[in-house]
């Protein structure tokens, strides 16, 4: 089973040289720590920064320079700043190659819910609805089950939808799943996790073809 | 002679009345018009409709206006950082319209560009789409979203001049130039105020034609929500 760092590490293997990538808040942000050294990836922050650098040293902290999670960051070689309309312009017009975001639920048809629990939690969608409506490739990073132990990989989302049929891949602590027309296709198992265990924890249609390899992280 | 410079936030905001619709620039607490928010709190104007990406935190930014119950309605994309906001929302004391962040930005832009509406794919198939006109282009569905109407836009810039030209710094730019273009009356507070001619025209982000009032702010706190650092090797 993976911890959140393992999930981030596995997603980092999806990055390709020259990719422009938007990383959501939470586990997705951690992906930045595992970008392979031999490729160049440019991170987009929807509050108006292309080319997110590492966190600043204590004496470099700048209140005017934050990421979409409101964390202090730095610029890096070739960074640029822009306003919020242009930021979503580059997202909407398909310039961002990959979006990684968290979710409360994903359905077997690629629907995603991650912005609201009616009557309980109302934080808002932020940029998520714009991202999922336009991004070419969307990977969801999340825990496989919720706090009550219920599967978050569902036949249909029960929470208010963020976007329809948009998720391409899901990475959880248990495995990697491609969304195909028939449902969640198990591509890799997390270390020491059995197919039966994944089956038990997945409510949506799980597709198993041949031997499912265990993932290799390093 | 252009007479855009005013003395301070109180002079800039003095004609904002109860029930006004106000746009406030900023992303989280980054690039928010701190001086003007303080002035609105002290003036005590009520029943405001605020259009702003976030709602501040409990004791800073728009959170200050929420605490004093001066806000009737918030139009935002993300409000997760403010417990008082969530309380007022869930209890029904505060009216809230949550809209996708890109839609929020582009509806401001449309106003400033003199366009009545935009089409965006954000929110298709979600509750954001309820009651909205939609249209298909090249096989994909888009929602019609209207340009914003507001009485005032209040923005924060790094540098400004007597003509109202503005330059923003780093990610404190965010919604500020878009809202500056979208106010019926636009108020800009700046850290550094210059004479006309002192700023390089090539570096201006917001041309002065969009700005009606400008003043040099003071005592900026620039609070940071999440100070994240790395250790020196």
Image (spheres, rainbow, N blue to C red):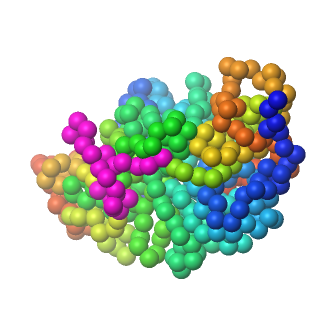
Give percent across and percent down for residue A160.
Answer: 35, 65
The residue located at (25%, 38%) in the rendering is B137
Image position of B51 with respect to B91: above or below = above
Q: Quadrant of the C terminus of chain A?
A: top left
Q: Nearer the viewer, residue A100 or B126?
A: B126
Drawn side of residue B96 relative to residue B44, left or right: left
**Magenta segment includes B128:** yes
Give percent across and percent down for residue B41.
Answer: 77, 64
Query: Is residue A218 at all visible to an observer of this figure?
Result: no
Image position of A34 with respect to B131: above or below = above
Q: Quadrant of the N terminus of chain A?
A: bottom left
Give percent across and percent down for residue B24.
Answer: 65, 52
Q: Give the magenta-colored segment's residue range.
A: B124-147
The residue located at (59%, 52%) in the rendering is B150
Query: Is residue B173 at all visible to an observer of this figure?
Result: yes
**Magenta segment includes A8:** no
The residue located at (57%, 72%) in the rendering is B94
């Amino acid at each position: 089973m993976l911890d959140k760092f393992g999930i981030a590490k596995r997603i980092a293997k999806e990055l390709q040289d020259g990719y422009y990538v938007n990383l959501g808040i939470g586990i997705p942000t951690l992906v930045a720590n595992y970008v392979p050294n031999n490729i160049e990836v440019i991170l987009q922050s929807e509050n108006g920064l292309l080319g997110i650098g590492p966190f600043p040293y204590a004496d470099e902290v700048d209140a005017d320079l934050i990421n979409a999670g409101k964390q202090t960051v730095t610029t890096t070689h070739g960074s640029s700043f822009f306003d919020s309309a242009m930021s979503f312009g580059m997202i909407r017009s398909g310039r961002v190659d990959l979006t990684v975001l968290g979710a409360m639920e994903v359905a077997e048809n690629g629907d995603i819910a991650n912005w609201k629990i009616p009557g309980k939690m109302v934080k808002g969608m932020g940029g998520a609805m714009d991202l999922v409506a336009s991004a070419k490739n969307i990977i969801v990073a999340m825990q496989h089950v919720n706090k009550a132990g219920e599967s978050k990989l569902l036949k249909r989302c029960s929470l208010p939808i963020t976007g329809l049929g948009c998720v391409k891949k899901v990475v959880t602590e248990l495995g990697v799943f491609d969304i195909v027309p028939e449902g969640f296709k198990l591509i890799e198992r997390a270390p020491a996790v059995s197919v039966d265990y994944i089956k038990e924890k997945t409510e949506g249609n799980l597709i198993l073809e041949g031997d499912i390899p265990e993932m290799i992280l390093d | 002679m252009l007479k855009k410079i005013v003395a301070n936030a109180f002079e800039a905001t003095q004609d904002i009345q109860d029930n006004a619709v106000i746009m406030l620039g900023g992303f989280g607490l980054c690039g928010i018009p701190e001086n003007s928010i303080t002035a609105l709190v002290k003036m005590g104007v009520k029943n405001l409709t605020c259009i702003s990406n976030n709602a501040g935190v409990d004791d800073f930014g728009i959170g200050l206006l929420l605490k004093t119950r001066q806000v009737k309605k918030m139009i935002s994309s993300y409000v997760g950082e403010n417990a008082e906001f969530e309380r007022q929302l869930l209890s029904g004391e505060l009216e809230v319209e949550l809209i996708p962040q890109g839609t929020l930005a582009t509806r401001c832009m449309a106003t400033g560009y003199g366009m009545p509406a935009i089409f965006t794919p954000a929110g298709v198939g979600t509750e954001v789409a309820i009651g909205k006109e939609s249209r298909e282009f090249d096989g994909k569905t888009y929602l019609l979203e209207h340009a914003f109407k507001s009485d005032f836009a209040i923005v924060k810039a790094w540098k400004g001049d007597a003509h109202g030209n503005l330059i923003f710094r780093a990610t404190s730019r965010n919604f500020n130039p878009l809202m500056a273009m979208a106010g019926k009356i636009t108020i800009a507070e700046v850290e550094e105020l210059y004479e006309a001619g002192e700023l390089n025209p090539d570096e201006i982000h917001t041309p002065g034609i969009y700005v009606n009032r400008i003043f040099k702010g003071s005592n900026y706190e620039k609070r940071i929500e999440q100070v994240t650092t790395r250790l020196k090797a």
